[in-house]
Structures are given as structure tokens and as C-alpha cells.
Amino acid sequence: MTTFTNEKLTKKTVSLLKNAYLGGCIKIGRKYATDKTTGSKMTLYQFAVIIAANEYADLRDRVTNPDGSFDKAGRWYPDNYQDCCSAIRSPSRAHPYSLMTHCRTAAHVAETWGVDPKDVKKVAKTIK
């Protein structure tokens, strides 16, 4: 298994994991996530990184789009505005997709899931 730079999770991330996989084939415990079909076990941090890497790969490859909406002038704004978004220029008529482009980055996805962007990129490299 890949070694990650940081194995700490926030309560928000654990809550996201539980809500995302409630009633699925993954059992979320206090420290570990267990696949009910295979019995394989991983830490919650590893599980969060895998989820974030899959989400990042889909956004990067334009399989999915980030959640957000357009205003009347055609500027796009995200539904889940994170701390990392504040450093990005506000959308304008000349640059309506500045935040959409940012929301496709590993840094934004990692911020959403509360994991390290380096870990997300490391795992996303293996996803094709």
C-alpha cells in the first residue's frame, strides 16, 4: 500500500465518508474502512484519498463537472466554496470559468475531502 504524507482526518471528512457510503458495501468504523465483500481493510485517511483521487480523475478528464451554477451573465460559481477558492480571481465576463477551472484541480478536491493534494495526485496517476 502507498505511504501517505499525512494520516490525520478532520471530523468533517469522516462525516463526508459516512454520508457518501451509508448503506453501501463499505463499512466505516472509527479508524478503518472495511470492504464487506472482500474483507480488505484500510485507514479512513487512505479511503478518503482514494475517493478524492477518483473524483479528481473524473473532473480532470471531464467525465464529470464540478457542482455549481451560472449567473445571468454566464459566470460560473461553485456550490461548495472552500478556503482555497478565495485565492482565485472572481469570475468576470472576460473570464467566466476561473472558479470552474480551479474546482477541477487536485488542490480543491483535496481541500474538500480534507486530505493532502500530493496524496491525491499520487493515487490519481494510477487511475486511467
Image (tube, rainbow, N blue to C red):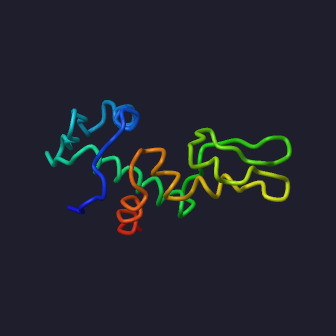
Q: Residue at x 20, y 41 (%)?
A: 32
Residue with the most extreme front position: 87
Q: Is residue 30 left or right of residue 17?
A: left
Question: Which quadrant does the N terminus fall into?
Answer: bottom left
Asked which quadrant contains residue 29, the reply is top left
Residue 81 position by quadrant: top right
Q: Residue furthest left?
A: 39
Give above or below for 52 relative to 81.
below
Which is nearer the eye, 111 or 37? 111
Image location of residue 75, percent across then percent down = 78, 48
Give the residue drawn at x 30%, y 53%: 6
Vertical arrangement, residue 117 with respect to residue 128, above or below: above
Where 46 sits versus 16, above or below? Answer: below
Looking at the image, residue 11 sits to the left or right of residue 34; the answer is: right
Q: Quadrant of the C terminus?
A: bottom left
53 displayed left or right of 40: right
Front residue of 108 and 18? 108
- Number of marks: 0
Residue 100: give x, y in percent of width and height: 66, 53
**Residue in the picture at 76% in, 51% down:** 91
| Image location of residue 89, percent across then percent down | 72, 54
**2 lies left or right of 15:** left
Q: How far across and down, in percent of the image, does residue 85 sit?
A: 61, 48
